[in-house]
Image (cartoon, coloured by chain):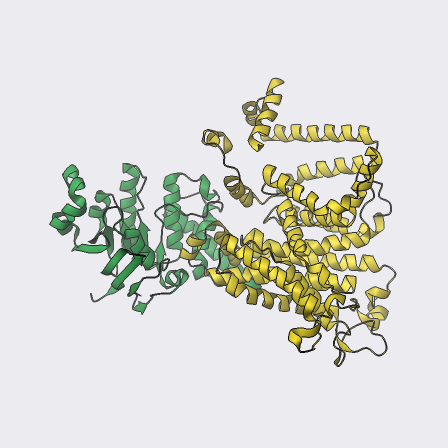
């Protein structure tokens, strides 16, 4: 792959005797939307956690933007440009929406302890700029005028949006979305699919998506990778995946029948 | 338990026609007016019972002032009204304390020396608040930092090291002095920095741990420090006397500005020789607490403060947002240690000594109680908690005990039960008001989701 933003080589994770990910080779090309699908327990989230430094791989390597990232701490991944959301929403529940986004900006701000105490002009400017940008981001994600609402008081859909806004605040090159439409109704899901499309067109983010909803996956992805029992069993454009027999057998079976 | 009391409260009020929904439906202004009136009525009853008119007038003024506080925020500069008023009350204390009447139960107002100790403990509690209140790391060994600060003062402002000879602006040196003597004004930041370094050294290996494990390890460090102090008169068998063992290091120099400043600027040359010894220490302590409060507020609203709160709320999510956990936690630890060290050095200067018996585990718990009682994460709450508990420790309990013995014809030595009483206070606070007496709004929400397992069917009314 000539211009791979994210690349894994023989990435492997074992929990005791259980092999959660078995030597997965995987790439996200720059500017692409790639989906990762697979039945429950296929090792998607484990894989995701290795791509963000939450888990250390048992073997294999992660390369991001040409740099070897294996065994670096999670904040280093964010620093280099990987922003993520969580499958079960993990907002800072008791901070306002604005503060959540500001925490996301942490790596892009520079004020240290002493500057904060003295409140130097530099820090003052940085903070007010950060606030402006945070409000813009909230508006972009459809959270206009919700900046002072405490995280836990937001509606479910808004919490999902806020998580995306917070991930975008880290100014990622690659956005990892872990089942972003889980629990959304069909209308919200459709809106979200459009939103992911906008992300790429307007802001040139690359996106890696874990998703269960086939309409989202097939509607938005350039490439789809299928995991089953920790192994990559297929990879390719959505249409090809839909026709791949191993995939249908392992995962799509019931869904493909019900949607056709 | 809390639920049943709240339910009982509303059913009692419901019996006289005021049910909870009806109360909630009232406009906020009227609700506040009713609350004010109720408090005033209660105060009037108390006045009638005890017959203390002077205090009653003050208390009513205070309650009315507090209830009007929210409106001040709308006036430009109004947010400074309350802090300036509190500052004024503390600064003027030496002048009006003699005039103050006896309080019911609690007896006379605290003496100046007690107020100095209350303020020093406020500073320590504010330091611990960085660690426990902001970053959410349970530290059971905070006394180690207090000890470090005190011994810094012991080493660099006394005759401890007999074969050294260094004078750096110190005041009140006697003939034939030896050792290091650095002026307290320089020593306070030095002690803070040295303690912060110790905090970082302790923090680096321990802060990788989470929750309970961190608490246990800090507990260990809190035990190690006083043992070093106690046995440091023959350090590692080398014969080097670091801490003077159980005897402690005494005397320690007092603060002062020197003779030149006294003649030209009318600043006290040496606190220890001054007529208004306690007042001087009091005003200096107020200055130190004010600096601590200032730093607390600035840091709370900064990038670093947000990172601390994010770690407290969800460590995994914070790491995923690019917050370096170790470094951020270590900063919290070092900041807390800094203020603990400064407070320790100042206290040592005030007591003119650093004694190993002052640094036992119970002091760690004592400071933690102050933070919990007042309200974790809330600056004013923590100061209140610290002042109140330090007051109880120094004077309050014996006064209350005397009152109790007089009225019930018992013969109890109430101060003996000190830590039992604090324990009861903490249990009551955690049961009924886990967020502390003056909570930070954020922390209140957090603790109410964590402490009480609220039954599901009440989930709808809980948020109303």
Residue A85 locus on image (x, y percent):
36, 51
Tell me which residue sits at (67%, 37%) in the image: B67
Which chain corresponds to the colour green? Answer: A
Task: Classify residue A26 by image quadrant.
Answer: bottom left
Tell me which residue sits at (27%, 37%) in the image: A186
Residue with the most extreme right position: B275
Res B104 visible: no
Is A142 left or right of B77, judged from the image as shown?
A: left
**What quarter of the picture does the N terminus of chain B occupy?**
top right
Which chain corresponds to the colour yellow? Answer: B
Q: Can you say whether A234 is above or below B433 in the image?
A: below
Q: Can you say whether B463 is above or below B140 in the image?
A: above
Across the whole image, how many numbered discs are drawn on residues? Answer: 0
> Foreground: B318 or B421?
B421
Residue A198 locus on image (x, y percent):
28, 50
Task: Classify residue A62 by image quadrant.
Answer: bottom left
Q: Can you say whether A218 is above or below A3 in the image?
A: above
Res B222 visible: yes
């Amino acid at each position: 792959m000539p211009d791979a933003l994210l690349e894994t080589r023989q990435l492997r994770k074992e929990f005791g005797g259980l092999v959660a990910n078995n030597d997965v080779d995987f790439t996200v090309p720059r500017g692409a939307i790639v989906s990762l699908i697979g039945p429950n327990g296929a090792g998607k989230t484990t894989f995701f956690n290795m791509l963000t430094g939450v888990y250390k791989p048992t073997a294999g390597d992660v390369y991001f933007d040409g740099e070897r990232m294996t065994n670096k701490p999670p904040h280093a991944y964010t620093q280099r440009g990987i922003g993520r959301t969580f499958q079960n929403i993990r907002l800072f529940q008791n901070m306002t929406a604005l503060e959540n986004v500001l925490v996301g900006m942490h790596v892009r701000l520079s004020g240290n302890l002493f500057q904060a105490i003295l409140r130097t002009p530099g820090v003052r400017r940085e903070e007010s700029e950060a606030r402006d940008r945070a409000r813009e981001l909230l508006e972009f994600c459809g959270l206009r005028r919700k900046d002072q609402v405490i995280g836990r008081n937001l509606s479910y859909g808004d919490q999902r949006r806020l998580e995306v806004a917070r991930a975008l605040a880290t100014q990622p090159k690659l956005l990892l979305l872990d089942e972003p439409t889980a629990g959304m109704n069909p209308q919200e899901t459709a809106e979200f699919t459009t939103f992911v499309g906008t992300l790429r067109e307007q802001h040139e983010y690359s996106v890696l998506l874990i998703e269960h909803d086939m309409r989202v996956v097939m509607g938005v992805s350039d490439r789809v990778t299928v995991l089953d029992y920790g192994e990559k069993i297929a990879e390719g454009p959505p249409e090809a995946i839909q026709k791949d027999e191993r995939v249908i057998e392992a995962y799509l079976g019931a869904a493909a029948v019900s949607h056709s | 338990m809390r639920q049943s009391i709240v339910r009982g409260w509303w059913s009692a009020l419901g019996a006289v026609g005021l049910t909870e929904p009806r109360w909630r439906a009232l406009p906020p202004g009227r609700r506040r007016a009713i609350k004010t009136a109720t408090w005033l009525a209660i105060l009037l009853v108390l006045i009638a019972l005890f017959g203390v008119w002077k205090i009653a007038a003050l208390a009513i003024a205070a309650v009315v002032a507090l209830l009007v506080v929210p409106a001040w925020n709308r006036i430009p500069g109004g947010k400074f009204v309350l802090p300036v008023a509190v500052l004024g009350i503390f600064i003027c204390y030496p002048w009006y304390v003699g005039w103050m009447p006896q309080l019911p139960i609690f007896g006379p107002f605290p003496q100046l020396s007690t107020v100095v100790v209350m303020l020093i403990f406020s500073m320590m509690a504010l330091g611990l608040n960085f660690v426990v209140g902001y970053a959410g790391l349970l530290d059971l060994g905070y006394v180690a930092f207090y000890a470090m600060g005190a011994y810094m003062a012991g080493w660099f402002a006394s005759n401890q090291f007999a074969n050294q000879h260094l004078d750096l602006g110190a005041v009140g040196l006697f003939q034939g002095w030896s050792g290091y003597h650095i002026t307290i004004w320089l020593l306070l930041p030095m002690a803070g920095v040295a303690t912060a370094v110790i905090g970082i050294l302790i923090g680096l290996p321990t802060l990788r741990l989470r929750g309970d494990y961190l608490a246990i390890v800090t507990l260990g460090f809190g035990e190690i420090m006083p043992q070093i102090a106690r046995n440091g008169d023959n350090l590692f068998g080398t014969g080097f006397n670091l801490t003077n063992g159980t005897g402690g290091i005494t005397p320690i120099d007092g603060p002062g500005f020197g003779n030149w400043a006294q003649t030209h600027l009318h600043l006290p040359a040496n606190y220890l020789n001054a007529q208004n010894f306690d007042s001087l220490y009091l005003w200096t302590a107020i200055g130190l607490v004010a600096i601590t409060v200032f730093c607390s507020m600035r840091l709370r609203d900064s990038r670093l403060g947000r990172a601390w709160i994010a770690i407290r709320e969800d460590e995994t999510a914070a790491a995923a947002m690019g917050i370096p956990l170790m470094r951020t936690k270590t900063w919290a630890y070092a900041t807390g240690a800094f203020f603990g060290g400064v407070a320790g050095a100042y206290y040592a200067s005030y007591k003119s000594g650093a004694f190993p018996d002052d640094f036992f585990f119970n002091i760690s718990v004592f400071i933690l109680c102050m933070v919990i009682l007042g309200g974790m994460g809330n600056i004013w709450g923590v100061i209140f908690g610290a002042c109140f508990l330090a007051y109880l420790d120094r004077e309050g309990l014996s006064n209350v005990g005397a009152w109790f013995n007089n009225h019930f014809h018992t013969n109890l030595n109430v101060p003996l039960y000190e830590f039992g009483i604090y324990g009861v206070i903490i249990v009551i606070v955690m049961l009924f008001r886990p967020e502390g007496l003056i909570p930070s709004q954020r922390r209140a929400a957090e603790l109410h989701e964590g402490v009480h397992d609220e039954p599901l069917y009440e989930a709808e009314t809980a948020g109303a």
